[in-house]
């Protein structure tokens, strides 16, 4: 299964999108009145229906096309092919073309919105040797020429993820004085980690995972709720695409928790990877460097290139550490001193203040480090208060969907260094000081601890049963 | 007159209630561990002139125990089970007790092996992955790497006798070699020659040769050619290249499930699905680049059913153990010919 994180590759995707055992292809059967006859099979395999009066009718072979099968999540289709076909650059082209046709005919059309993650943008910038700002302007130009109406940056929705995570951590820390089972808090932004946890470690690990939605899904809520209302549209009339560094995000977008029952629409309709965007550019036979700059949107901070501190996976540990140091220990952190443990993807940070209890946090990237954290928690031996868990070694800038190296192009190590360098080149801003975020908390959510806040910015997890049906084992 | 080499039955150890999958001698050669579908591990030792069952380790696993392996110091026993876990048993306090259960594999664990350096463990599973575990100072087992190099069920894994290099073999017909580089473990060589599932691999005592057995009914001998070798075999980086230099075919009638290379007498013993045990010796004057092995002894009907595992005693050159689907463990005496 190319592209998915190793946590998802080792588990079975089919347990998330369950292929049904029955073929649901409706086959029109011409029934003639009368008693049921017999079926006779000829030597050449033709079937004849012999009615009770002896009349023989040759039976038609049932026809099922591959498209029928892919549309159904049926017996021969694996979950992987369902995901890849329903969410791909081809699907985006199809929707855009359909949309253009509707517009041309003066019919109602969908508002197409694309939200780009900074890691995906960095991958494109690295491939085409552009600065982040240039890559951004050109990507906007590319999408808008294809018929996309608005292009946003998920860094904006990440502000909400970070703020909510900080607040949740402090809440849990206070609660841990009476209830030990609320810490350690585990990051929730990585769907590779979430799906693996739901599948393999079920009920005992899920309570530790932060309930905060990932930046992708908060953008989904922002676009389909707030933005929809601003534009006077209903959520099902917006087609929301996100550009992500990995394939696991496709699985995240398809979760039922992120499906709006009222309007029968997903918060994120389609996730394409940076690699898939590169394929779109190749199909149009154009280099991103040669694309004309597009007009940047102004909503959701889309016209200002800003980022967050704390590394290429969102900076959860850094932001929570600083906030907790202030709120719990009453100190202001200057620099976080990371100590590498058994490998570079497992690092810990200790926050101390005179006379106060020590806070310990860790970064655990990659399947082998996730294993160790989970086992420590299971045996009540985890020394950390918060762990930033990500499924991919080196984090999101190294996601499985990022643009691959072409022949002779550099080395994997150098490419990752370029992508990370570009990602870090963007000036940072603290989520606490983004005015539009603060005002949206009032305007959109009605306050910091409101019910709407919980609905829009938080989610839940479900233990997933392993399918032990022998028919579903992939030998 | 030439005396033929002989393999004669020494005794039969009864006790297991179902098929026995694996036999393993402790490093001192004084204890034999066996495990099987009855979910138990039995420890056998010699008492006077008899071999008796000293312990039965139960309650460790919920399904078949497929492989047992002794640590190089002899104080620990690891058990790999179809229940997807690995049991670590310690006899530091006298009797064996289960001190840890390693979880993580998605389904049946097929094998477990300890590296000679003492603090590395390898496991492999039907989930197609090979895991490397590190033993910490306080007897904790932490996952050091998860390697998904094979494309099918990984049947077995074996460490190099004196390097931290692991060999694994699989239903995908290949043998793979792994070692640690900078921050992580990776597969640095794939040995392809068998036409079907490779069930087991083992190194000779020096570690420059490998023997493998397969569902294709052959035994293959592989030779390592180091950088700068005089045969002119090209190498990559500072690792050697492995070449298949000998194939023993026509000796076995069915799948060969196990092979062991004696560290003491240099002979190979195979356990086969045709119920037989066979001993192979390298001929005098055999050319390193095209060695010749001949079958020096065999017992066609060593067991009533498939022979699943065979193991040379590490100290006593003539002693050999075997086990089978027939539920029995047997000890054999090998006498060299002249």
Image: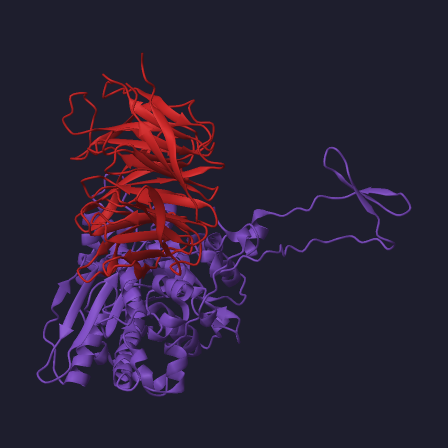
Quarter of the image for residue B202 reads: top left
Quarter of the image for residue A342 reads: bottom left
Most extreme residue toward the front is B48
Q: Nearer the viewer, residue A219 or B102?
A: B102
Residue at position x 54%, y 62% from top?
Answer: A105
Residue B42: x percent and y percent?
37, 51
Q: Is residue B189 visible?
A: yes
Residue A81: x percent and y percent?
48, 52
- Please state if A463 lies on the left or on the right of B190 as rendered: right
Drawing shade for chain A: purple
- Please state if A475 lies on the left or on the right of B11 as rendered: right
Quarter of the image for residue B50 reads: top left
Q: Nearer the viewer, residue A323 or B84?
A: B84
**Figure chain in red:** B
Q: Is residue A27 above or below residue A221?
A: above
Residue A4: x percent and y percent?
37, 54
| Applied colour scheme | by chain
Residue A438: x percent and y percent?
28, 83
Residue at position x 42%, y 56% from top?
Answer: B83
All told, the count of numbered labels is 0
Q: Nearer the viewer, residue A442 or A250?
A: A250
Q: Nearer the viewer, residue B148 or B300?
A: B300
Q: Is residue A205 above or below residue A416?
A: below
- Please state if B181 lies on the left or on the right of A396 as rendered: left
Q: Is residue A293 visible?
A: no
Most extreme residue toward the right is A53
Most extreme residue toward the top is B1
């Amino acid at each position: 299964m190319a592209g998915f994180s190793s946590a998802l590759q080792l588990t079975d995707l089919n347990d998330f999108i369950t292929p049904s055992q029955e073929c649901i292809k409706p086959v029109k059967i011409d029934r003639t009145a009368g008693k049921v006859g017999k079926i006779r099979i000829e030597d050449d395999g033709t079937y004849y229906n012999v009615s009770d009066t002896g009349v023989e009718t040759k039976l038609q072979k049932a026809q099922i096309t591959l498209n029928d099968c892919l549309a159904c999540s049926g017996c021969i289709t694996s979950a992987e092919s369902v995901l890849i076909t329903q969410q791909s650059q081809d699907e985006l082209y199809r929707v855009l073309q359909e949309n253009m046709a509707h517009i041309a005919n003066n019919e109602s059309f969908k508002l197409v919105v694309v939200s780009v993650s900074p890691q995906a943008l960095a991958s494109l910038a690295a491939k085409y040797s552009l600065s982040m700002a240039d890559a951004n302007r050109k990507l906007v130009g590319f999408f808008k020429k294809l018929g996309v109406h608005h292009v946003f940056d998920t860094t904006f929705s990440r502000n909400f993820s970070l703020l909510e995570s900080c607040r949740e951590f402090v809440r849990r820390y206070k609660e841990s004085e009476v209830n030990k089972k609320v810490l350690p808090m585990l990051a929730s932004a990585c769907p590779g980690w979430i799906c693996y946890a739901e599948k393999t470690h079920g009920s005992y690990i899920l309570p530790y995972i932060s309930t905060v939605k990932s930046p992708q899904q908060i953008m989904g809520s922002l676009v389909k709720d707030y933005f929809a209302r601003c534009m006077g549209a209903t959520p099902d009339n917006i087609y929301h695409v996100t550009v992500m560094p990995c394939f696991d995000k496709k699985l995240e977008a398809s979760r039922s928790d992120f499906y709006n029952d009222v309007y029968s629409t997903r918060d994120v309709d389609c996730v394409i990877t940076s690699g898939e965007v590169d394929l779109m550019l190749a199909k149009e036979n154009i280099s991103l460097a040669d694309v004309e700059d597009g007009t940047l949107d102004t909503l959701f901070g889309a016209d200002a290139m800003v980022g967050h501190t704390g590394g290429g996976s969102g900076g959860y540990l850094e932001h929570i550490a600083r906030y907790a140091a202030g709120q719990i220990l009453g100190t202001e952190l200057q620099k976080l001193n990371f100590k590498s443990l058994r490998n570079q993807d497992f690092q810990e940070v200790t926050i101390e203040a005179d006379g106060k209890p020590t806070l310990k946090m860790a970064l655990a990237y990659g399947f082998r480090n996730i294993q160790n954290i989970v086992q420590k928690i299971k045996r009540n031996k985890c020394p950390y208060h918060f762990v930033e868990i990500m499924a991919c070694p080196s984090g999101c800038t190294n996601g499985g969907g990022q643009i691959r190296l072409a022949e002779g192009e550099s080395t994997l190590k150098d490419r990752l260094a370029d992508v990370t360098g570009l990602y870090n080149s963007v000036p940072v801003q603290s989520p606490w000081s983004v005015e539009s975020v603060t005002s949206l908390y009032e305007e959109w959510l009605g306050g910091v601890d409101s019910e709407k806040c919980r609905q829009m910015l938080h989610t839940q997890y479900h233990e997933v049963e392993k399918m032990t049906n022998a028919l579903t084992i992939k030998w | 007159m030439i005396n033929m080499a002989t393999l004669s039955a020494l005794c039969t150890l009864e006790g297991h209630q179902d098929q026995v999958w694996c036999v393993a001698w402790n490093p001192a050669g004084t204890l034999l561990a066996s495990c099987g579908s009855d979910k138990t591990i039995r420890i056998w030792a010699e008492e006077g002139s008899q071999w008796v069952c000293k312990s039965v380790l139960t309650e460790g696993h919920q399904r078949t125990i497929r492989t047992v392996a002794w640590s190089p110091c002899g104080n620990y026993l690891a058990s790999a089970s179809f229940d997807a876990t690995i049991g670590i048993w310690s006899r530091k306090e006298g009797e064996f007790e289960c001190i840890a259960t390693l979880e993580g594999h998605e389904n049946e664990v097929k094998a477990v092996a300890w590296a000679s350096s003492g603090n590395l463990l390898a496991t492999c599973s039907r989930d197609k992955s090979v895991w490397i575990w590190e033993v910490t100072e306080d007897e904790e087992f932490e996952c050091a790497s998860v390697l998904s190099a094979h494309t099918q069920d990984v049947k077995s894994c074996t460490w190099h006798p004196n390097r931290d290099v692991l060999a694994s073999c699989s239903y995908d017909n290949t043998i793979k070699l792994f070692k640690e580089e900078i921050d992580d473990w990776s597969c640095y060589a794939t040995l392809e020659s068998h036409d079907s599932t490779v069930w087991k691999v083992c190194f000779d005592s020096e570690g420059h040769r490998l023997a493998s057995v397969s569902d294709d009914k052959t035994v293959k001998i592989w030779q390592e050619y180091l950088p700068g070798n005089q045969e002119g075999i090209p190498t990559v980086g500072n690792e050697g290249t492995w070449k298949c230099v000998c194939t023993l075919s026509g000796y076995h009638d069915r799948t060969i499930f196990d092979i062991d290379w004696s560290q003491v007498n240099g002979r190979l013993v195979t356990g086969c699905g045709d119920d037989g045990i066979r001993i192979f010796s390298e001929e005098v004057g055999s050319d390193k680049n095209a060695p010749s092995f001949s079958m020096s002894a065999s017992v066609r009907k060593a067991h009533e059913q498939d022979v699943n595992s065979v193991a040379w005693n590490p100290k006593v050159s003539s002693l050999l153990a075997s086990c089978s689907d027939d539920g029995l463990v047997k000890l054999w005496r090998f006498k060299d010919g002249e």
